[in-house]
Image (tube, rainbow, N blue to C red):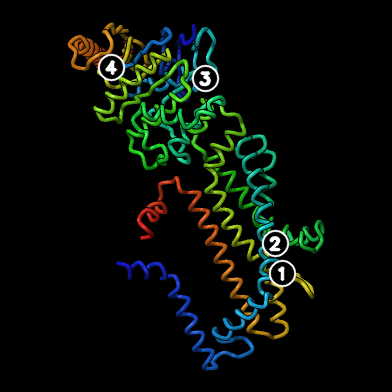
Amino acid sequence: MTGVLSVNIAAMRLPGRVEGDNLIEDLSFTLPRGSFASIIGPSGCGKTTLLRIVGGLERGFDGQVLLDGTPVVRPSRRIQLVFQDSRLLPWKTVAGNLRFAMNDNQSLNEPKIVDEVLSVVRLADRKDAWPRTLSGGEESRVALARALVDPPRVLLLDEPFRNLDFVVKQDIQADLLELLRQQQVTVLQVSHSIEDAVFMSDLVYCVSRGPMKITREVPVALRRPRKRHDQGLKAVCDDILEHMVSVASQKALAVAEGGDGRL
Amino acid sequence: MARRKWVSSYSGAILPLVILSLWEGVARANLLPASHSAPPSTVVGRFCELVWSGVLPKHLVYSLGRLLGGLLVGTIVGVASGVLTGMSRRADKLLSPTVGFLAGLPVVVWMPFWVLVLGSGEVFKVGLGLTATYFLVHIHTFQAVRSVGLRYVELAEIYEKPLHDRIRQVLLPSAVPSIITAARISVAVGWIVIFFVEYAASQEGSEGLGWFIADARQIGRIEDELAGFLLLGVSGYLLDCTMGFLQRQANVWRESLESRFEERGGR
């Protein structure tokens, strides 16, 4: 069995911060192969840093990340990260950016693979475009397509649908879920949209800031394919929203009473 | 609209035409000593004769060969050492103080050294062209490699790109616009250096535009001398246009004022 992701972070402190002033503390979870989990939390709480840790891009933390029981100590194709800022190579066309992500065995099927992944993100007609000519939403979609070129065991998504309009987002999300499910890719997504998180995930982690901790784990046991106006889905969203508001209020109260805001 | 575009395309010729007209008028009115000046129309006539007879093309080929030889070798070595010191802190610490010191020396200071090492033949002239190119390209490449966004380096790490692929697909494409800028400046500096060496250090029977001009001056053929200057200027201008074209091609992916001018048809 491959694709089991286990994260266990005792403490993560940003450079220049004093001892005890941790960005992340006592955070652990395990995702089974092919599962889709989302992290919901306030801005600046360390969600992106968590994804970087899982992706092997951050090393200064106490704890470990295991993929199929093996520690993740450096970035690799097995765990791919779709960054919030897309990170397309500006000197390569859209097709060139996708070719950059191919492994050595894929070179023979380059054109076919490029066409296939671009059709998933609805950009088949933009393969020769320079990144500077793409809209923010198109850039995000190319970044997503790049991660699908050589499907990883774990896919980390940092707000991948942030710049997408509602109709395109719905289309892409449905196709993406189907593709990820076929490939049995384990996904960890960071999102600010509770609805997106619940719509796509099997599991939603609510996190707080200062330091970042999991405050609640919400399994989403709704049948797929899901519908956004489904009452069950709305109920889960409301439940999560209520929890997040309650945590934020408690934190604000703790700070007002002279504490450091830790719960 | 078409007339406006025509004027815009040829506006660069207005100033030279005004200067040439004034020069022609002054020369025809004998306001300049004949030993130091000739009317542009006479110079252009002589220029055409010298081109047609193959004299000027022969000297131009020699000068260009020396310039491009130095440019090619200087660029290759400069890019290689720039990438090496840009990527490796150890190489930076080892090489940069020496390169920094040598880069501060004027190109003419290198003349005795190259004469000693390479003699005073063709290789010496190419060596000076190389000197004019190498330091500029090295410094620009080093700086460009150090400025490559960490975001792209991380991407190469995620896709497990081997070192040669990181250089070829990430570092160099990002650095190429800076390298071509350096090469463009090197062409201008190298053209001056090659002319200077040919002009000052050539012997009887030498080749090159600098030698042709020096010889014409010595025997008092002012039309030949000015025709040589004309070719020198036109060649320098065309070389700069070629480098400018390469620079635009290298920057085609960038969102810049240049790309906006290109998209709007030069306005």
Q: Which residue is under mark 3?
A: A59
Q: Can residue A253 be seen in this view?
A: no
Residue sitting at x 55%, y 46%: B176
- Check the residue under mark 1 and report the chain it is in: B
x and y, in percent, of residue A157 in the image: 39, 22
Examine the rendered structure and indicate whether residue B40 appears above or below residue B152: below
User: Callout 2, which amino acid?
Assistant: Arg
Amino acid under disc 3: Arg
Task: Please name the residue that numbered disc 1 is placed on.
Answer: B198
**In front of the other: label 4 or label 2?**
2
Residue at the spot of label 4: A255
Q: What residue type is labelled 1?
A: Glu
| Residue B169: image location, x then y, percent | 55, 37
Residue density around tag 2, few if under 14, some if 14–19, many if 20 or more, within 10 Å: many
The local crowd at label 3, few if under 14, some if 14 to 19, many if 20 or more residues have their Cα within 10 Å, is some
Picture quadrant where residue B38 is located: bottom right
Element carrying mark 3? loop
Do the residues at discs 2 and 1 belong to one chain? Answer: yes
In front: mark 1 or mark 3?
Answer: 1
| Vertical comparison of B253 with B130: above or below | above
The residue lying at 45 percent from left, 48 percent from top is B252
